[in-house]
Image (cartoon, rainbow, N blue to C red):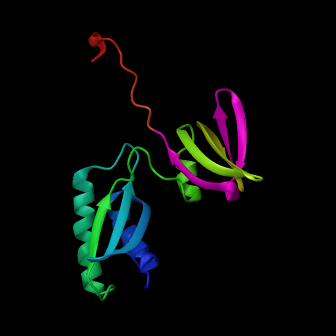
Amino acid sequence: MQYYRTQIEDIAKKICAEMQVAVYDIDEKMSGKGRIIIVYLTKIGGITLDECARFSRALSEELETFDLIPERYFLEVSSPGLERPLKLKSHWVSAITEKVAIQYSDAEDKRSVMGTLQEVNQDSVVLDDRGELIEIPLKAISRAKTVYLGLPRGNDNER
């Protein structure tokens, strides 16, 4: 299967610059119906449904104009969500001061930890797990995501 991620990302970044949003990630997968291309968008303060729809129309037009993907495909545009995966260095940097859950290998053991992301270094991340700082090498991480704990509820007068 030929992948088009790089070409799609180049086009998507140009559209994002015009719309003042950013590409968070792009996934490509095959299903029984054909190729599915999923573009995740982000911006400070959150992405709206209208922005996703405008981006989707613009990207669809560009992909059709360039006739980039010869076979049938489906395009999905979405926010990465409140609990978003952390794959790229830019994902980690954008999550500093947020709660994150990490699965990683430590020698022979598989471990899971949740804490507040404090630092992103060249080869590691540092979490604060209830006052204990834990440094985890990026190479050891098998899975990571931000964690949404919900907003604290105040009394009825604060709503």
Q: Which residue is nearer to you in this view: 85 or 64?
A: 85
Counting labels gives 0
Give how far across and how far down residue 56 sits, in percent.
26, 66
Query: Was residue 145 drawn as part of the magenta stretch in this picture?
Result: yes
Q: Quadrant of the N terminus?
A: bottom left
Residue drawn at the location 45% of the way across and 50% of the way down: 84
Against 110, is 1 above or below?
A: below
Q: Which residue is nearer to you in this view: 41 or 141?
A: 141
Residue drawn at the location 38% of the way across and 48% of the way down: 81
Give how far across and how far down residue 29 sits, in percent.
39, 73
Give the side of residue 91 with respect to residue 130, left or right.
Answer: left
Give the side of residue 65 with respect to residue 104, left or right.
Answer: left
Q: Quadrant of the C terminus?
A: top left
Residue range corresponding to the magenta coloring: 125-147
Give the side of residue 25 with respect to residue 117, left or right.
Answer: left
Q: Which residue is nearer to you in this view: 158 or 149?
A: 149
**Which secondary structure type mostly characterizes the magenta part of the structure?**
strand
Give how far across and how far down residue 62 sits, in percent.
28, 78
Give the side of residue 154 with respect to residue 120, left or right.
Answer: left
Residue drawn at the location 25% of the way across and 70% of the way down: 58
Query: Was residue 51 drawn as part of the magenta stretch in this picture?
Result: no
Give how far across and how far down residue 134 sits, in percent.
71, 39
Residue drawn at the location 30% of the way across and 62% of the way down: 77
**The image quarter in which residue 3 lies:** bottom left
Against 8, is 1 above or below?
A: below
Q: Which residue is nearer to you in this view: 20 or 32?
A: 32
